[in-house]
Amino acid sequence: MSDLEAYRRASPRARLGVGAAIVLVLLALAVTVGIGIWRGHSTPPEVVGSPTEVPFEAQGADEIYVHVAGAVAAPGLYVLDSGARVIDAVTAAGGLAADAGTAAINLARPLADGEQLVVPREGEDPPAAAGDGSAGALVNLNAADEATLETLPGIGPALATRIIEWREAEGPFTAVDDLLAVSGIGPRVLESLRELVTV
């Protein structure tokens, strides 16, 4: 006798018990599935490595851009850690060329963001602002041309042009602090220039 026949011949009470057991199993399964769906909707997925974990303001805050030119193996624009020195920029640019005038540069000098570092060749005069801030290395804001101004830390072609335009429109600089009147020069850039320029 098959199971189906045995079920049909069973008493109504036995049939009711089997049916109730099946209903309970289906009900338990439905509750389990329902809880799983509810939890899935109420808990946001965890995103590992999401860029929102790091505030935008902090990204790149400890980096500076330095243009390395002259007697180095690979001149170009390099991104360095904040607080980097000339030796770090030279190393990033592949090291000094064989004909570099090593005595003409201060490898320990701190670098500023936006600076152009020119490494002279043996026998060449060092760039006016590449010295250590001594009187002989000062750049005169009232006499320097664009190329000379661009050797200063933080001064690119646009700022060099603005400095010259300002002195032509307003007259000679009377103090280094007058640089604050030039659009694009703020207190941070001024402090990086203070020991390198004169009027």
Image (cartoon, rainbow, N blue to C red):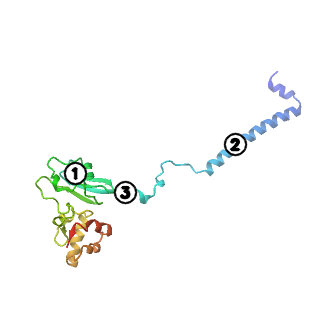
Image vertical order of residue 16 relative to residue 182, above or below: above
Q: Given the current orientation, which residue lies at the most extreme top position?
A: 1
**CA–CA distance between discs 1 and 3?**
22 Å
Residue 124 falls left or right of residue 188: left
Q: Given the current orientation, which residue lies at the most extreme left position?
A: 123
Image vertical order of residue 99 relative to residue 173, above or below: above
**Location of residue 27 in the rendering, given as x and y in whole percent from the top left corner:** 75, 41
Q: Which residue is mark 3?
A: 62
Q: Are marks 1 and 2 in contact (CB under 8 Å)?
A: no
**Residue 120 placement: quadrant:** bottom left
**Location of residue 31 in the rendering, given as x and y in whole percent from the top left corner:** 72, 44
Give the crowd class for mark 1: few <14, some 14-19, many >=20 residues within 10 Å.
many
Residue 154 falls left or right of residue 60: left
Amino acid type indicated by mark 2: Thr
**Residue 147 or 45: which is nearer the viewer?**
147
The residue shown at (28%, 53%) is 78
Pair 2/3: label in front: 3
Amino acid type indicated by mark 1: Pro
Q: Which residue is mark 2?
A: 32
**Location of residue 43 in the rendering, given as x and y in whole percent from the top left corner:** 61, 50
Q: Which residue is mark 1?
A: 75
Q: Are marks 1 and 3 in contact (CB under 8 Å)?
A: no
**Residue 4 or 77: which is nearer the viewer?**
77
